[in-house]
Image: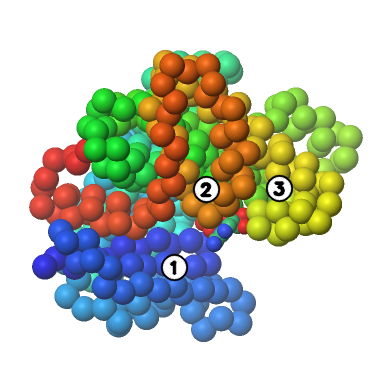
Amino acid sequence: MTKILVINCGSSSIKYKLFSMPGETLLSKGLIEHVGEQGSHIHDHYTGLKIILDKVDSVCAVGHRVVHGAEKFKKPVLVSKAVINEIKKCCDIAPLHNPANLAGILACNKLLPGTKQAAIFDTAFHQSLPDYAYIYGLPFEYYKKSGIRKYGFHGTSHAYVAIEAARILKKPLKNLKIITCHLGNGCSITAVDKGKSVDTSMGFTPLEGLIMGTRCGDIDPALVTYIMRTKNIDAHSLENILNKDSGLKGISGISNDMRSLEAKARKGNKRAGLAIKIFVYRIRKYIGAYTAVMGGCDALVFTAGIGENQKGVREDICRGLFFYLKNTPRVLVVPTNEELMIARQTYDLVNKKGKRS
Ligand code: ADP
């Protein structure tokens, strides 16, 4: 039995799961909160990870979730000095996530010297996008010199549920066209053709694409400067509004939580109903687009909080959706398990196995 510890360091939290591999048994899991917050006794990620490592023993390798790997990381890698430097470079384009992910890696380096660590990137699965899907209609030097392009996120989740869908359908992934909908607080949708991500709704940052709990998703880019000018707010304040006060929360004026919105809409609250309609409409547009991109769709997969639990939303999304297709896609609900996917990839790296599919 090989014990793989999976670590997901956020800015103020650390989630962990311990797996026994290759059997994929979950041995333990936990969450440390209030990391680095005022008044908390957990001053930093090092202190938090020390608490976790006191609870687990005989860890063979650690797999870390890292949000942004830019174009440098197209697949999971074992951590080295060079890898740490490259992850540092990505902090500029993922300032809310990568510094915390890196803090977790550095802490484990100190706490578990000699234990192999792997970095598993949210962006890696989408590195298979063709250039015509990831380059924006901006001056080309922005891409060439500054790396401004679509990267996409939630890659580990999209990859996991696509693999699961193929298993459920008893067909090889390489014969399938799958649309995966990760609908949680953050929401994204991916076209997976023959096991590869060929387009995805999130972009340079996770703000692009679908309406989310508190993020706006696609808007007219001219609105950014228009709102700054007319409301007299600076870039930082607007970023906060687009990320934290928009989406379901902004439209409804009630909540970012889809369960509350459904309950309010049932009682006749118009804005809650409108927020759900806009949410559903945007997803339907993307499903139509991605069906066209792949020239068909064999399976539509729902995952994450809303995707797994909210039947009403799923039914609204699917109503009359595929009437123009010769073959109606299978609609599947697949609980995501990003931690297991990270454990598998870490195990494979440690054992130097090739890529699974
Ligand atoms: P996150 O992106 O924070 O991981 P989740 O995947 O937990 O988000 O999804 C949160 C969303 O899922 C919320 O809108 C919530 O209302 C909805 N949801 C519906 N049912 C559940 C459930 N049983 N557990 C968690 N979230 C649920």
Name the quarter where the N terminus is drawn: bottom left
Q: Residue at x 50, y 36 (%)?
A: 189
Q: Is the residue indicated by label 3 positioned so its CB lies within 8 Å of ligand 1?
A: yes
Secondary structure under tag 2 reads helix
Q: Amino acid at mark 1?
A: Ile
Residue 246 can be seen, yes or no: no
- Sequence order check, earlier mark of 1 and 3: 1
Mark 3 = which residue? Answer: 248
Position of 49 relative to 353 (above/below): below
Residue 159 location, x and y as percent?
Answer: 34, 41
- Sequence order check, earlier mark of 3 and 2: 3
Residue density around tag 2, few if under 14, some if 14–19, many if 20 or more, within 10 Å: many
Query: Which mark identifies residue 14?
Result: 1
Q: Is the residue indicated by label 2 positioned so its CB lies within 8 Å of ligand 1?
A: yes
Position of 248 relative to 26 (above/below): above
Q: Residue at x 49, y 52 (%)?
A: 308
* Mark 1 → mark 2, Cα distance in angstroms: 24 Å
